[in-house]
Image (cartoon, grey):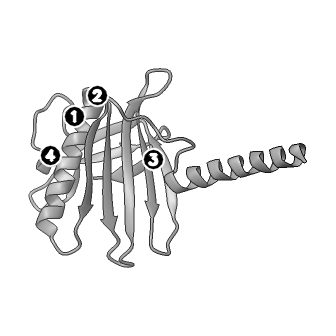
Amino acid sequence: MYRRTMGLGLWLAILLLIARASATGYAKEPDFAGYDVFGPYTVPLNDIGNGLKIYADLRSFIWSHWHGHRRGYAILTEISVEESVPCQTTYIIEPDKYDNWHIDKRWKCKKGHPRAGRSIITSVRRVVRDRSGYRTDVAVADTADVPSESYFLVLLDVSGQVVREL
């Protein structure tokens, strides 16, 4: 009897760990002590001005932490215009175990659309935003001190593929 109970308890513990990892996206809750925090913010569907401000602030946060090698995490919820589905993205800026800086981008959608994903970003570039608000291919120097409204961030993975443009 003890042996059966022990086995059942072990299986319940394993199922609980799997359920927790599925719900949060982490096998265990990360410890963000010592990390700077951006958010959580929600980009509103009907307030373009406020949305643009949030994106500009997010670009500034990501760039300053990436360029300055400062740990930080940002949480942003965007609502899909087509489907009206809220999707939460977390950007974790930190070094890996070899002290190489990266951004761990995790996202998940809610409300009947259980989509989720993860990308590891190994390169961040700034490119000029033209007067019409469109992205150009003109790079912004890493040392240039320019307002975040004047550039886009291009986030790339290890193969050089664009993961996200902000």
Q: CA distance from mark 4 to mark 1?
A: 10 Å
Rendered location of residue 59, percent (x, y)? 22, 46
Quadrant assignment, res 35: top left
Q: Amino acid at mark 1?
A: Ser
Read off the residue under disc 3. 161
Read off the residue under disc 2. 70
Frontmost residue, 88 versus 157 = 88
Rendered location of residue 46, percent (x, y)? 18, 75
Q: Nearer the viewer, mark 4 or mark 1?
A: 1
User: In percent of the image, x 51 and y 59: which residue is there?
Assistant: 116
Q: Nearer the viewer, mark 2 or mark 4?
A: 2
Q: Nearer the viewer, mark 1 or mark 3?
A: 1
Frontmost residue, 23 versus 94 = 23
Q: CA distance from mark 1 to mark 3?
A: 22 Å
Residues at badges 2 and 1 in contact (C-beta under 8 Å)? yes
Q: As drawn, which residue projects farthest toward the top?
A: 98
Q: Amino acid at mark 2?
A: Arg
Rendered location of residue 89, percent (x, y)? 38, 54
Read off the residue under disc 4. 148
User: In percent of the image, x 44 and y 21: which residue is there?
Assistant: 99
Count residues near mark 1 (Cα–Cα under 10 Å), then give few for <14, some for 14-19, many for 20+. few
Q: CA distance from mark 3 to mark 4?
A: 23 Å
Q: Nearer the viewer, mark 2 or mark 3?
A: 2
Secondary structure of residue under mark 2: loop
Secondary structure of residue under mark 4: helix
Q: Is residue 128 visible?
A: no
Read off the residue under disc 1. 64
Rendered location of residue 1, percent (x, y)? 90, 48
Q: Is residue 100 visible?
A: yes
Vertical placement of 82 versus 43: above or below? below
Secondary structure of residue under mark 3: loop
